[in-house]
Amino acid sequence: MNLVLTIPGTTVSYKEGNENNVYGLIEPVLKATGGLTLAQVRKITGLETTTIQNWVKRGWVMKPENKRYKERHIIRIILINSVRGALHIEKIVRLMEYINGDVEDTSDDLVSDSTLFNLFFKTVWLCDRENIFDRHQMTKIITEEIKPFNYLNDSEKKRLTDVLLIMNLAYSSAVLRRFAEEEIKNLL
């Protein structure tokens, strides 16, 4: 059965079965348009204009190029948006810096933003599918997913595992919080 699901941090739906390369669902639009306008970014993320502009102003997201948000911009915005329901924005930014250094410099990236996005999404999906909320079981899933990254040494794999675990826990927490808030609305 192909379920229609939503990509974390977005309003974009996808059909079950695309979990290995969810970025591939967004990439063709970016390539065809040369980037997205602020209005388009707002539409796919559900964020307010001022929120996106604030993130750019503070240096958490790169400045758009010719008023266009390209791959790295979009992915960074989506990743931050995915976990901001459970973590303070400053901590999310520090987490992104821990894995990929300076937002403007790709030479210090442990993995590309699109790889991080795909790994995050895939591990979220796997944990959700198995109803896993335990950090030890999440770590097992994450470790299995990063095994093919032979170019990373053990220390780098540990960093990537730690970041993905925190992101998964934060995302799960945010989802559970939304569920709890919906239940409270039903009671009151």
Image (tube, rainbow, N blue to C red):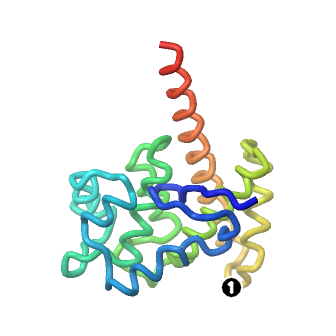
Residue closest to the eye, 107 or 2: 2
Query: Looking at the image, can residue 75 be seen?
Result: yes
* Residue in the picture at 58% in, 71% down: 22
Position of residue 178 measured from the top left corner of the image (x, y, whole percent): 52, 35
Q: Residue furthest front?
A: 1
Q: Is residue 154 left or right of residue 182?
A: right
Residue 89 drawn above or below residue 104: above
* Residue in the picture at 77% in, 74% down: 147
Mark 1: which secondary structure?
Answer: loop
* Residue in the picture at 41% in, 79% down: 29
Within 10 Å of disc 1 (Cα), the crowding (few <14, some 14-19, many 20+) is few
Q: Which amino acid does label 1 sit on?
A: Tyr
> In which quadrant of the rendered view does residue 176 lie?
top right
Q: Which residue lies furthest to the top in this view?
A: 188
Q: In this view, does 122 lie to the left or right of 27?
A: right
* Residue in the picture at 57% in, 48% down: 171
Residue closest to the eye, 54 or 94: 54
Residue closest to the eye, 187 or 178: 187
Q: In this view, does 58 lie to the left or right of 185?
A: left
Position of residue 107 measured from the top left corner of the image (x, y, whole percent): 45, 84
Query: Looking at the image, can residue 110 be seen?
Result: no
Position of residue 86 measured from the top left corner of the image (x, y, whole percent): 50, 41
Position of residue 2 measured from the top left corner of the image (x, y, whole percent): 71, 61
Q: Quadrant of the N terminus?
A: bottom right
Residue position for label 1: 151
Residue closest to the eye, 167 or 107: 167
